[in-house]
Amino acid sequence: MKKQTAAILLAAALLAQPAAAQCLITGEDYGVGASAAIVMEAQSGEVLFAQNIHEQLPMASTTKIMTALLTLERQDLQEEFTVDDTAILTEGTSMGLQKGDTVTLYALAVGMLLSSGNDAAGAAAVRLCGSLADFAREMNRRAASLGMNNTHFVTPSGLDAEDHYSTAYDMALLARAALQNPLFAEIVAARRLTVWYGQPPYARSLLNHNRLLSLYGDAIGVKTGFTKKAGRCLVSAAERDGVRLICVTLNCPSDWSTHAALYERYFSLTESRPLGAEPLMLPVVGGTAAAVQTAIEGQPCYTAVAGRAEEITARYYLNRSFCYAPVTAGQPLGHVVFFRGDRVIGTALLTAAQSVSAAPAPRIPWWQFWRR
């Protein structure tokens, strides 16, 4: 039976820290041909399938998810500059940068995510931080903030290097964070994009190396990777009927078919359910009504195991314990956070369900003025 509780707390925001791995579906005897693999529910971060998810392994070019995320968070994405000649001299896959080329950070992000350009990753790293070593430190700072506790970055490209490693769980955390960046999500979902660079810049059409986008209809990204040491690595995401899943395999020879099979299995075992909570009556000062009812903006949902009854709790975080008239319908009043156990599974904005006008000023009888 679904039970909801509410606690009124005076807070403007809730800062959620990364939680430890929790498995939503337990007791399964199921495995895949990979050194490590995970299926994560993207909204809550809960784990649906786990196979050696905390084993430290090389992750090849899936590293570029972090490089691209840090790049796309800059404000000057369309500013043109000349690539650093040394930074682009990197072996392996390339977007075709040459000495003296004029590029933008946006073009480099597309080049590293679609063409898996090692030259693009190096050029972006030097542009952002001045050196590959300083950029690696920035990558590791961000990894720590995301709870990627078993990850250490050395290169922006993912080429094999001593002490360059991650885990299936950590890479799923990274993909979950990166997909919340709209521009990142737009790029990795595209099969082909056109960007401008060169001497002078001219249009180049770059093809996405992620074949899962064409092989699996629900796929929405994210990034491929391969080195002899790491084997075939794939971080992907797919969405169906309101459920978004993230899948990571490290050293998996049959990664395309493995990801498709895992998605089919776990989409069939999960479902999207609506989130709701009892409205509050918030006192109104100076209004034509004594209180205003709260409403939840939008239609928040969460992912659950199909057919399983669950206890969901809701906590309200209000901007104030009251509000002043006038109040406008739809006016933000705070937010509500939904929990399954101690895991946050959704948030929503709390608004005023109706308008409340300001009460007219009280009329003072004429004889009161005479007494003065």
Image (cartoon, helix red, strand yellow):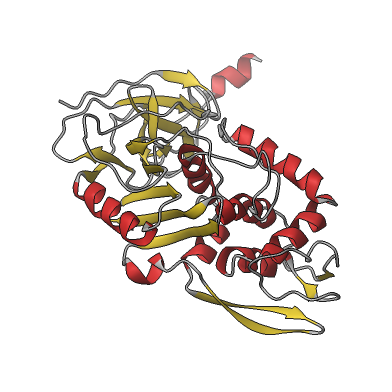
- Whether residue 288 is visible: no
At a point 81% along the width and 76% down the height, the residue shown is 101
Q: Residue furthest top?
A: 371
Question: Whole-percent x and y of residue 178?
Answer: 54, 50
Horizontal arrangement in the rendering, residue 161 relative to residue 274 (left or right): right
Horizontal arrangement in the rendering, residue 76 relative to residue 300 (left or right): right
Quarter-of-image position of residue 119: bottom right
Question: Whole-percent x and y of residue 126?
Answer: 81, 56
Closest to the observer, 331 or 162: 162
Which quadrant is home to the N terminus? top left
Q: Classify 66 as above or below 12.
A: below
Question: Whole-percent x and y of residue 205?
Answer: 59, 81
Closest to the observer, 273 or 184: 184
Closest to the observer, 178 or 272: 178
At a point 67% along the width and 51% down the height, the residue shown is 70
- Whether residue 264 is visible: yes
Question: Whole-percent x and y of residue 342?
Answer: 38, 22
Q: Classify 227 as above or below 191.
A: above
At a point 50% along the width and 28% down the height, the residue shown is 323
Numbered circles on residues, count: 0
Q: Residue furthest front?
A: 228
Q: Classify 299 as above or below 46.
A: below
Horizontal arrangement in the rendering, residue 297 relative to residue 172 (left or right): left
Which quadrant is home to the C terminus? top right
